Image (cartoon, rainbow, N blue to C red):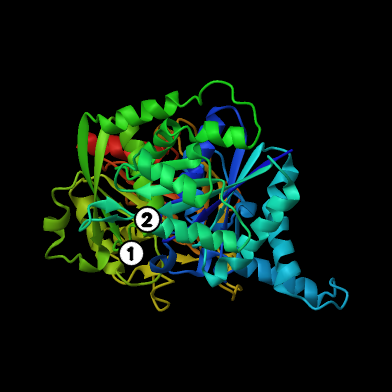
Amino acid sequence: MVKYIFVTGGVSSSLGKGIFAASLAKLLQGRGYSVTIQKFDPYLNVDPGTLNPYEHGECYVTEDGAETDLDLGHYERFLNVPTSQMNNVTTGRIYQTVINQEREGKYLGKTVQVIPHITDEIKRRMRLLSESGKYHIIITEIGGTVGDIESLPFVESVRQLVRELGPYNSLVCHLTLIPFLNSAKELKTKPTQHSVNQMMGYGLKPDLIICRTEHELGEELRNKLSLFCNVDRECVIQAIDKSSIYEVPLEMQKENLDTTVLRKLSLPNAGNSDMSAWEDFMLKLKNPKHEVHIALVGKYVELQDAYKSINESFIHAGAINNCKVIVHSIHSSEITDENVSELLGQMNGVLVAPGFGDRGIEGKITAIKFVRENNIPFFGICLGMQMAVIEYARNVLHYADAHSFEMNKKTTHPVIDMMEEQKTIKKKGGTMRLGAYNCILKEKSKSALAYKTTSISERHRHRYEFNNKYLDVFEKAGMEATGTNPDNGLVEIVEIPKHKYFVGVQFHPELKSTVLTPHPLFVSFIKACIEK
């Protein structure tokens, strides 16, 4: 029988439930168990696809084309296993399903209510992944904080499901904050006690208390939490702040988290979790031989989570290159002809990030012109690749008004145009070119050398593409299409072979980079930056 672990949060949001869930899953995976993680988000959007990055961080895209919460990126980076449409569910999707069924008459005239109809649909979704027969353990992260009105149906659903599953088949982990009062010079447990008390008022008792803290808890405080929160002493787990999220699994192992969880679930507990590959990664991460400075040019740099997968990909690629990657976030709106040399001249490499809309576009083009002319390693992703095409069209091909049809519908040279199948689409949510598509690489190109193959598959999220009407003139002028889709001829990768490293990709390579398999293009980009 599949075992279920539920992760809830208390006291404060943004405590790192996703990192904890991924760390626990990694430890259990290291013991030979097949584990997956799913995220239930309490907001009413059907998915995060239409959310501004300032609202919710980056939108993570799965192999099968789901636009999901960024925590699914953590799940994949830690477990090295792809997620899917079924791994992220929102309140909006739950209500949409129930309302559609009501319209179809499937409730036989009954009054449709939160209990049992909404909670039944939540429980069905929570158990859906078990139908594949691939997993021993399913971890479910509940977004938000216990006590939030919007989270109540999920908490109630967990309560019902725990009861239905029976003893030893489920476990509830409650992640909470233990604040440190500087004036009193002590950690305070009262917020956690109140959070657990409120949770128990909803009929749900936590089995483990995971304590986010800036300081060591100490035995006295752990005993106090055990007593007042009604959990076993070994079920009070310290989650102390670390400099890197990748230290968390090893810290949780020291806390015997996996041992405690297996005992609570009545699962075999043979030996220690094999974390040797993870330890090797951490050794390289903490002991770099090189250091490079990378400019990340984007539109949402004020929010760290807006480019979460890119930043994590730099960490993965840096470690395998024995290199510390220092990322300098630069807002594209601030880049001008007058200051571009000052901002980018001392950088070892420049990555121009993805995005939507025309804000900051000219700054991206200015940055790309500078790095192209000064032979600085360049990596463009999605919109970054499109801006590289526009820059080349304007300054090498001398098409003065060259642009993307997205930004300028009156341009006489739409070198970036809307995909043909997108032209009749009106709805915004879930209608872009999403998910994994195949790509064939040109032999001996930088991309083919990085991948060590000429046949790849990468994830996409876009509506606009390179306009193939201009392909011949670009290639004659020195910018080559080195990666194309075998089915429709879509240009996936552009390169300038004479440049030290100039690669632009239409897809999102950052979505497939993990701790144990860093993405080849990030690895080759960092290598080029080290050589510079």
Residue at 12 percent of width and 63 percent of height: 339
Q: Position of residue 457 (x, y in %)?
A: 54, 43
Residue at 32 percent of width and 52 percent of height: 477
Vertical side of 516 occupied by 381: above or below: below
All told, the count of numbered labels is 2
Which quarter of the rendering shows the N terminus? Answer: top right
Question: Residue 234: which disc?
Answer: none
Judged from the image, the secondary structure of the residue bearing numbered disc 2 is helix
Which amino acid type is marked by label 1?
Tyr
Q: Spatial distance from mark 2 to mark 1, Cα to Cα?
A: 8 Å
| Labelled pair 2, 1 in contact (Cβ < 8 Å) | yes
Q: Position of residue 213 (x, y in %)?
A: 34, 48
Among the 4 quarters of the image, the one containing residue 421:
bottom right
Residue at 20 percent of width and 67 percent of height: 334
Residue at 25 percent of width and 68 percent of height: 333
Which residue is most to the right? 108
Among the 4 quarters of the image, the one containing residue 498:
top left
Q: Is residue 504 visible?
A: no
User: Which one is nearer the viewer's eye here, 460 or 239?
Assistant: 239
Which amino acid type is marked by label 2?
Tyr
Question: Residue 300: which disc?
Answer: 1
User: Which one is nearer the viewer's eye here, 110 or 210?
Assistant: 210
Apparent side of residue 519 relative to residue 102 in the rendered image (left or right): left
Apparent side of residue 200 relative to residue 237 in the rendered image (left or right): right
User: Which one is nearer the viewer's eye here, 183 or 470?
Assistant: 183
Mark 2 burial class by Cα count in 10 Å: few <14, some 14-19, many 20+: many
Question: Residue 307: which disc?
Answer: 2
Q: Position of residue 429 (x, y in %)?
A: 57, 69
Q: Position of residue 243 (x, y in %)?
A: 29, 43
